[in-house]
Image (cartoon, rainbow, N blue to C red):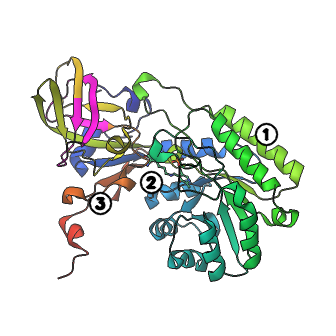
Amino acid sequence: SHIRSSYTDACSFYGRHTPRELAETYGTPLYVYNENILRQRCRELKGLSAHPGFGVNYSVKANANPALLKVARQEGLVVDAMSPGELHMDELAGFTPKEILYISNNNSAAELQNAMVKGLLVSVDSLSQLDLLGSLNPGGKVMVRFNPGIGAGHHAKVITAGKATKFGVTPDKLDDVLALLKRHNLTLAGINQHIGSLFMEPDGYLNAATVLLHLAERLPAATLATLEVIDFGGGFGIPYHKYDNETRLDMADLGARLHALISDWAAQTGYQGRFLVEPGRYVAAECGVLLGRVHAVKNNGDRRYVGTDLGFNVLVRPAMYDSFHDFEIYEAPGACARDALPQTIVGNICESGDILAKDRTLPALHEGDVLGVLDAGAYGFTMGSNYNMRRRPAEVLIQSDGTARLIRRRENLEDLARCLLD
Ligand code: LLP
């Protein structure tokens, strides 16, 4: 056991391995995922409602590694795609067109066409894109993303509904939507929304879901009759403060209320289609830990700086949103007990904003320690970059039998030069 590893110990996160051994074998930075935890999260979400039309649409922007997507598919989830690249990952994982929703935002005609040619249902989120889609695919099907006017989220940058965001068609434009559907002879096959990311209390989500259902009730009967999908969006929060025992989102409560809402509504309206939730973080965050190494420790002024290989090219959330991630410390064998003190954990990128945690009180970190950044499975690798010409990390999956499988190799220098032309 290590200085601080009770969280991953309790869930046998590293299976038959130790984090130091994984760091040694595969190098750092390294994303490590646990298959059992991923499956558990998928099952909790599937269990939210037993309504026959209820489904979980995993938003793969959180983590699009096909090895994880295959697990999600085995667990009965469907997926979204926001870009040709995400669509490609979905396809590599074996999802069929019926199992992928293309939730677009400001797409080119070519992107929309690409998704439609493949037989995907495409969601557009402006009148302008609805008009474009209709001209590309007259007589076809379409989904429209509405903005329910209620936003929520852990940071202004992740609130995706309400007046101050770029997303969705506001409900007052419903008549214009209907007119465009008619002009292009389009069938409205679905409506969707996404109010924002990381709620820990169900009320806002359920209120927004109710608003979307009220909007569906305003549709002409013939239009409501063709609706196949109502997608309430994602945003399901996870407790990032693992060592403070932060309370989890009450999935039983959320599930009971969501189930009642959709079952009653379906009974009342005769709706036979699907109801989807569209979580990203909830599926992928907790199954991932990011491993890094401490390379240098120093005091600048009053501050103790712990220098690691975990720059914001590897995990941008703290730098971008001031997000909190908890840490574990896996020290070399034989290290002695350490006092806790405030430390600022930084990466190896040439910017002073390259900070993972500021003045965080933790047992004193030393050179050679391996650090585990918890809950890094969502918006970790996918938001990574090659800034400072750093190579993107490898990814390892701890499979259900406890063995490790490399599911993405670390980039090499040729990868960095691959697209260059003379
Ligand atoms: N559906 C749509 C249309 C979305 O835009 C998003 C996230 C989701 C579903 C999934 O949201 P989730 O369940 O993961 O909250 N990078 C930020 C989060 C940005 C989310 C953007 N959209 C972060 O690291 O916190």
Q: Assess whether mark 1 and mark 2 are in contact (beta carbons under 8 angstroms).
A: no
- Disc 2 versus disc 1: distance between alpha carbons? 31 Å
Magenta stretch: includes residue 351: yes
Residue receiving disc 2: 63
Residue type at mark 3? Arg
The quarter in which the N terminus is drawn is top left
- Disc 3 versus disc 1: distance between alpha carbons? 45 Å
The quarter in which the C terminus is drawn is bottom left
- Disc 3 versus disc 2: distance between alpha carbons? 16 Å
Residue receiving disc 1: 260
Residue 58: quarter of image: bottom right
Q: Residue at x 11, y 26 (%)?
A: 301
For residue 409, which numbered disc appears in the image? 3
- Dot 3 crowding, Cα within 10 Å, few <14, some 14–19, many 20+: few
Left or right: 401, with 206 as reference point: left
**Disc with the residue nearer the chain's start (3 vs 2):** 2
Residue 222 lies, with reference to residue 252, above or below; the image says: below
Q: Is residue 107 visible?
A: yes
Residues drawn in magenta:
344-372
Residue type at mark 1? Ala
Per the image, label 2 sits on a secondary structure element best described as loop
Per the image, label 1 sits on a secondary structure element best described as helix
